[in-house]
Image (spheres, rainbow, N blue to C red):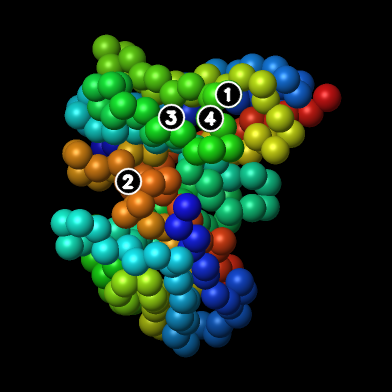
Amino acid sequence: DVVMTQSPLSLPVSLGQSASISCRSSQSLVYSDGKTYLNWFQQRPGQSPRRLIYQVSNRDSGVPDRFSGSGSGTDFTLKIDRVEAEDVGIYYCMQGTHWPLTFGGGTKVEI
Amino acid sequence: EVQLLESGGGLVQPGGSLRLSCAASGFTFSNYAMSWVRQAPGKGLEWVSAISGSADSTYYADSVKGRFTISRDNSKNTLFLHMNSLRAEDTAVYYCAKPKVTGSYSVDVWGQGTTVTVSS
């Protein structure tokens, strides 16, 4: 199975500052169609996960442009600019290139 | 609006069985693969199982293979997870999820989850 390693585990940030989360995969996430199936999810306290970013850098509808994804191959980053109180929660990366789908361990963002 | 509503969770003894359901609405159910993902208390996310739109293909995590069976009733827009030989480590919130596009097995839209507790 592809192992997804996130860092840091916990990320204290100040309101208005930026935050950056790293996600590394044990294998390349480039699929045979040339696309890279790396998603980012946000899970606010007491809620279900919500997809923020798909295929490395594409924001889902309704996701603020403060969220951005980047990376390639095995190394990926989620950046949150101008952190707001509503951004508190746990962020997960997930790969959909190889079976089974696997998730990172999560990064807890707290103010 | 897409809605996924899980039900069927509860308290069950080790070795017992349970059937989870996920009622779907707001999209053409039979056109989409569906999945189950679980989250143990205070832990991360674990993909459990997936099924194609026509139900002719199914996939399982090694941790549940041989004990869990995924199925669907496209006439009733409902996804199921039949869980047998339950263990304490199966205790989790179970979410059903769907991709945003057809032809994918991604888990992009999630229900609110149903809680399964395996304990004597």
In three-dimensional space, the C-alpha distance between marks 3 and 1, rounded to whole angstroms, equals 23 Å
Q: Which of the labelled discs sits on residue B67, or is there none? A: 1
Q: Secondary structure at mark 3?
A: strand
User: Subunit of mark 2?
Assistant: B
Residue furthest to the left in view is A33
Quick check: marks 4 and 2 in contact, CB under 8 Å?
no
Would residue B97 be visible to someone looking at this image? yes
**Residue A82 image offset from top left, x and y in percent:** 41, 83
Real-space Cα separation, disc 2 to disc 1, in angstroms: 23 Å
Position of the C terminus of chain A, as image quadrant, is: bottom right
| Residue A20 at x, y percent in the picture | 45, 80
**Mark 4 to mark 3: distance in Å?**
24 Å
Name the chain under label 3: B
Looking at the rendered structure, the kind of residue marked 4 is Lys
Q: Which mark is residue B106?
A: 2
* Residue placed under numbered mark 4 in the picture: B65
In primary-sequence order, the first of circles 3 and 1 is 3
- Mark 3 or mark 4, which is nearer the start of the sequence? 3
Who is closer to the viewer here, A18 or B62?
B62
Q: Secondary structure at mark 1?
A: loop
Residue drawn at 47 percent across, 81 percent down: A19
Q: Do marks 4 and 3 share a subunit?
A: yes
Q: Which residue is mark 3?
A: B5
Q: Chain of mark 4?
A: B
